[in-house]
């Protein structure tokens, strides 16, 4: 049966509680930290050698679609009625948004060390200790909007510019691709300062704290953010039905700098061993409300 992923602002209090409780149970059993390890392992920049699948590559969108599905299935083993909500950051765009309430994601970090002190994922509550990280930090941190170096959340116009591009991705298939929906929504640019980041990347930096970098999964808002990114990919597909739904279709040839470094349409993406081609249509699994 096809299930629905809802905007987090439309969740009932019971749905919020069920989602939070399922996440906490995955944390308690150690399952959650496996997802953190996976994201750290596959957070590979385009300056590194070898295959890139999670970031700075065409497979950014299908890799995360699969990552979200595997996580959602883990949640549903705890509570079969739980689905991933999404965070539309073009509308709920301030620290006062309901997303950050004490019964859901908790609030901003405190001054000084940016430690989140409210909500179910606050270290002081005793259920959310960061045990898999790229630093020695043990508690969830946020610095929303980065007041000392301000950055805003993306606007509807920012999203619209990405959705308007009729091409999925373009060579050189990395963070320097100047056009193509994938990089416009992932958000790498040649600008400096705040202008360096757009959409997906901009949101990570607006939340800041542990949401910046490979260990971002330690903040449960990661899943709501990426569910919205996934919904935007669905919207792009619907808006451009005649476009190639994923590029490159064929692997870059020998001699191309990206040979062996990006996943083509039917090449397997580790660690899931599924190809982008199998993840282009989610309509038989879930829909977005």
Image (cartoon, rainbow, N blue to C red):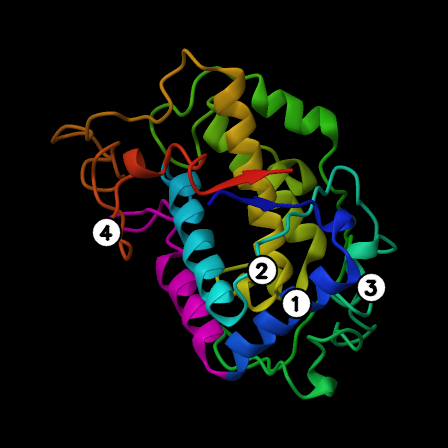
Q: Is residue 189 visible?
A: no
Badge 3 or badge 4: first in the primary sequence: 3
List x then y, in percent, for residue 11: 74, 53
Question: Helix, strand or loop at disc 2?
Answer: loop
Badge 3 or badge 2: first in the primary sequence: 2
Verify CB contact (< 8 Å) between mark 3 and mark 2: no
Q: In the image, is residue 148 part of the stretch drawn in magenta?
A: no
The residue positioned 72% from the left and 43% from the top of the image is 89
Which is closer to the viewer, label 1 or label 3?
1
Residue most toward the front? 1
Residue labelled with disc 3: 101
Is 181 displayed left or right of 95 in the figure?
left
Verify CB contact (< 8 Å) between mark 2 and mark 1: yes
Q: Which residues are magenta?
A: 29-54
Q: On screen, 237 above or below 2? A: above
Residue labelled with disc 4: 273
Which is closer to the viewer, label 1 or label 4?
1
Residue most toward the top? 242
Is 71 displayed left or right of 220 in the figure?
left
List x then y, in percent, for residue 23: 58, 70
Q: On screen, 91 above or below 108? A: above
Based on the displayed image, in which of its 4 quarters is residue 277 positioned?
A: top left
Badge 4 or badge 2: first in the primary sequence: 2
Question: Helix, strand or loop at disc 1?
Answer: helix
Question: Helix, strand or loop at disc 4?
Answer: loop
Q: Residues within 10 Å of mark 2 (few under 14, many from 20)?
A: many
Question: Helix, strand or loop at disc 3?
Answer: loop
* Alpha carbons under labels 2 and 1: distance apart: 7 Å
- Camera-side residue: 151 or 144? 144
Q: Residues within 10 Å of mark 3 (few under 14, many from 20)?
A: some
Q: On screen, 206 above or below 100? A: above
Residue labelled with disc 1: 18
């Amino acid at each position: 049966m096809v299930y629905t992923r809802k905007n987090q602002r439309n969740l009932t209090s019971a749905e919020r509680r069920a989602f939070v409780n399922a996440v906490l149970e995955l944390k308690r059993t150690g399952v959650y930290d496996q997802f953190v390890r996976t994201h750290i392992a596959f957070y590979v920049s385009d300056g590194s050698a070898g295959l890139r699948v999670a970031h700075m590559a065409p497979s950014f969108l299908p890799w995360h679609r699969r990552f979200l599905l595997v996580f959602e299935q883990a949640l549903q083993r705890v509570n079969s009625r739980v689905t991933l909500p999404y965070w539309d950051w073009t509308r709920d765009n301030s620290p006062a948004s309901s997303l950050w309430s004490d019964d859901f994601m908790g609030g901003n970090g405190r001054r000084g060390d940016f430690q989140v002190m409210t909500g179910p994922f606050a270290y002081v509550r005793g259920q959310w200790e960061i045990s898999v990280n790229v630093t020695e930090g043990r508690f969830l941190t946020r610095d929303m909007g980065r007041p000392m170096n301000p950055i805003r959340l993306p606007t509807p116009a920012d999203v619209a510019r990405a959705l308007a591009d009729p091409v999925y991705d373009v060579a050189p298939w990395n963070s320097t691709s100047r056009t193509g929906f994938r990089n416009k929504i992932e958000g790498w640019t040649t600008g400096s300062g705040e202008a360096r980041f757009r959409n997906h990347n901009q949101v990570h930096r607006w939340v800041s704290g542990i949401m910046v970098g490979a260990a971002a999964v330690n903040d449960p808002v990661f899943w709501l953010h990426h569910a919205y990114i996934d919904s935007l990919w669905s919207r792009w597909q619907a808006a451009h039905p005649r476009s190639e739904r994923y590029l490159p279709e064929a692997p870059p040839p020998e001699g191309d700098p990206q040979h062996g470094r990006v996943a083509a349409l039917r090449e397997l993406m580790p660690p899931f061993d599924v190809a982008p081609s199998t993840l282009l249509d989610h309509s038989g699994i879930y829909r977005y409300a």
